[in-house]
Image: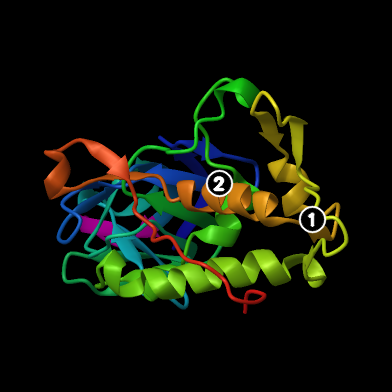
Amino acid sequence: MAQIFSVKEDRLCCDQDKIVALKLTGNHSTRNTIPIKVDVTFSVDRAGEYFVAAWDSDGGFRFESDTFTVLGGDHVLQLGPFYASCQVDCPFRAAIDNWAIYDRERRKLDETNSGSIEMYIFLGSTALPLEEYVGQDVHVRELIWRTIPRYFEVAAHSFAQVRQKVVTDVMFRFWHGGGQDFEYDMRSGASSFLKGNWVLNENRFELGRMLLKQSQHCNCDDLAALMYAAFKSFGKKQTAESNGNETDVRVPFFSWTSSPP
């Protein structure tokens, strides 16, 4: 019997709801390291080699532990890191809600859904520094929930192949999220979420207020600031052109001729 009952991660961020943001390392097409550690309780009938695997229900993302050898009986082990074979060119998210223990012949012995984790997996470091607010680079949960695509939407595709759909989906979530659409301020064209001195070009974008839609009206400056934050949330990655250095995940410029979809 296998039961996942606690999770400890080497992570960029985590909260009590077991929502984690992780940096994917390794070869992004064959063996990727998922840097989490999991405490697992299980029992087996006989001595042998075993491993633990986890996956999401709808997207096909799966990762496994290294094999381990134990005697027959009850055990409590801490496993990790885990490893996944996934070809990705874009950050993604996956709701991990299935765990199972297998023997060396890959026969499933038992499974559980008690170790649910919402994972946001990035290819590099953060690209949206928030030092002036919290003292460190972070991923903003309320932001990446609206921006980062699910694994099955981007798996086995280059970002160039999926970015138009990614952009469209992001715009849809921001414009229609929260039950009410934004409305452009047709009366005065005023900003609702930029505060500061326009003359000195010292403006502070109130991202939290806009995510909460504390005003239903906005203008082009609000939308430009929001899209800057939205696509900065994709973080950085290494490319062949950058000689191993990290650069921002590139999202194309676009324009609207009318309200977003």
Magenta stretch prevailing secondary structure: strand
Relative to 261, residue 15 above or below:
above
Specify the label residue 72 is tagged with. none
Provide the residue designation for mark 1. 189
Relative to 19, residue 9 above or below:
above
- Front-lying residue, 72 or 82: 82
Q: Considering the numbered disc 2 on the image, is that residue within a helix, a strand or a loop?
A: helix
Q: Residue at x 50, y 31 (%)?
A: 129
* Res 14 quadrant in image: top right
Q: Position of residue 196 (x, y in %)?
A: 75, 29
* Res 15 quadrant in image: top right
The answer to whether residue 230 is left or right of residue 64 is right
Structural distance between the alpha carbons of marks 2 and 1: 21 Å
Of badges 2 and 1, the one in the foreground is 1
Q: Residue at x 67, y 56 (%)?
A: 220
The answer to whether residue 39 is left or right of residue 104 is right
Amino acid type shown at disc 1: Gly
Provide the residue designation for mark 2. 229
Q: Position of residue 28 (x, y in %)?
A: 20, 56
Residue segment shown in magenta? 43-51
The answer to whether one can see residue 30 in this image is yes
Q: Position of residue 95 (x, y in %)?
A: 51, 64
